[in-house]
Amino acid sequence: MALKFPDRYESDYLIIGSGIAGLFAAIKASELGSVIILTKKTVLDCNTVRAQGGIACVTDHGDNFDSHINDTIIAGAGLCNKRVVEKIIQDAPSRINDLLDLGAKFTRRRDLQERVSNEENNEYDLGKEGGHSKRRILHSGDITGEEIMRILYDACKRNSNIKILESFQAVDLISSKKLGLNGKNQCLGAYALNNRSNSVHTFHSKFVLLATGGAGKVYLYTSNPDVACGEGIAMAYRAYAKITNMEFFQFHPTCLYNPKARAFLISEAVRGEGAILKIKDRGTYIDFMNSYHESGSLAPRDIVARAIDKELKRTGQPCVYLDVTGHSESYLHKRFPNIFDTCLEFGFNMSKDFLPVVPAAHYCCGGVQTDVNGKTCVNNLFAIGEVGCTGFHGANRLASNSLLEALVVSNNAIEESKGMLQKCVKNESGRSLYNDIPDWSSGDAVDADELVVIYHNWDEIRRFMWDYVGIYRTTKRLQRAKTRIRNIRKEIEHFYWDFTITADLVELRNLASVAEMIIDSALERECSIGLHYNIDYPDADEAMMQKEIVLQRFETAGKSSKYSARV
Ligand code: SIN
């Protein structure tokens, strides 16, 4: 029997996205009211599930908050918001305790017994990654994300206040300004496409939390899953939120180089356990990282990714190699079971073979501008996790800091919403704004006849973003990208307004919008800092480095009244 879905839904909290930020916020919010989670595929189609390294958190063992704060700010090239960094790092132990209470299991030293004495057996095994001056990464082998999703998803399924709707793709936020209502701009809910029935539903909600994750699919090569199209950023922009730091896109240095591996990540934690990067130069494997940074292969990610790019161009080689053969097979299999088995599937035994690796787009440090509570400039709209930009990561994210940020900011967002629940959907005279929300209307849009436009533009964006807006940028390349994206965006807008929407069209529209934001921000940042490297500006200009680059939509009217709900 086919399931029936109502046209309109109402909840206290609408959460868009189902990774660590979305599910953790849902669990916290369920103590205060009703929660709906929308996820465009299944709950487990998210970036979190792929997280390998772990969660950075100060535990005892000679570590302290100041050291973690300092490492974060150094990695962020001085562009981090220090107060945000302090708050997130100091809150880490409480949020980790929340995960432990929910049943999370992190690897203990006894699980890797080979290298520890008995009295240390019960301690957590702390991993190390680039830019951290101490071992401080809690992990579950190399499937930390899977473990976190397991406990969060279980808790959500058991909770009668949480309704999860899979295959529901958010199309747009509903905000009072988009509806032309007077007063401060306020988020009232969202329209979402049911991908099974192709119908659009209206979701009213007192609070909307964007937890849509990253935007790695904007690049041709990425460690991200297919769902990472940046829709939260694009939707927030269309609802007049501020978007910032989009020029800082992090490239992970080590993804498996194999056409069938789809940029499978080889965790930085492997280098934390001593793996060395090597380039094949005239038949000899050379350890090249020491000539780029004193920390060698464990230098911060931006430096390693740029060094690899340079070495590949210098030697004409297609990849570099990761040598972790100094460890035994049994240790590697225990510490990195997923990576070990996956490499084996591709014909590499980590304990014997060098692993061919290349960089790939990994993490969007920019996003919807928020405070440390995930609050945006649009009332009742929060952005949590990778989609938001609190200022924690600055110009370059320190490894394994993102799951931590997602936990702390999600918790803070729900705390912040307490006490606002009663008054948030009224206008100044106290009337409910829900009455003003029209249902979705397709006007006289028809089914598209030439879907090739969607696939062509999808491929073209991802390729020129990789070639022109990648690890090394020049102003000329950025301008080329700008010309192309402008034309493509026009074509997509035409499609969006004239044809009935489909999941692919919604994703493409968002992807193109995010690509344009990255290009615009990169063009505006006329210097090289952190993850943004423009060859035309090799030397740091202090004022340009510190400049706050914020994008915000200024036009107010929708395209046409016939699509009253489709602005
Ligand atoms: C990794 O395991 O290398 C990825 C961790 C991260 O991106 O923080």
Image (tube, rainbow, N blue to C red):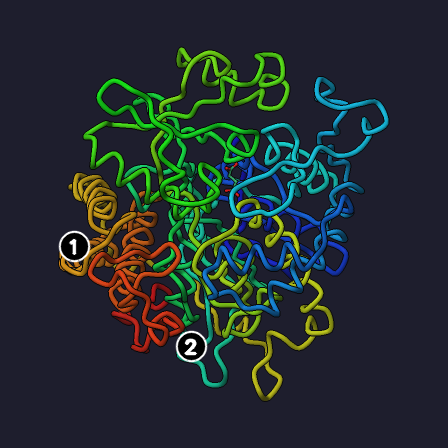
Task: Write the residue at 32% across / 45% down.
Answer: 306
Residue 350 horizontal/vertical position (percent): 48, 16
Left or right: 113 as drawn, with respect to 131 = right
Q: Is residue 518 visible?
A: yes
Residue 565 horizontal/vertical position (percent): 38, 65
Q: Which callout, 2 or 1, points at the residue further toward the start of the chain?
A: 2
Dividing the picture into quadrants, the one containing residue 313 is top left
Could you tell me which secondary element the residue under label 2 belongs to?
Answer: loop
Residue highlighted by disc 1: 477
The amino acid at mark 1 is: Arg
Q: Nearer the viewer, residue 307 or 342?
A: 307
The amino acid at mark 2 is: Lys
Residue 177 has which mark? 2
Q: CA distance from mark 2 to mark 1?
A: 36 Å
Left or right: 487 as drawn, with respect to 233 = left
Residue 216 horizontal/vertical position (percent): 38, 44
Kindly indicate whether the residue at mark 1 contacts the one at mark 2 (C-beta within 8 angstroms). no
Could you tell me which secondary element the residue under label 1 belongs to?
Answer: helix
Q: Nearer the viewer, residue 255 or 32?
A: 255
Q: Is residue 494 visible?
A: no
Task: Write the residue at 65% across / 52% down.
Answer: 407
Task: Write the residue at 42% across / 28% down.
Answer: 264
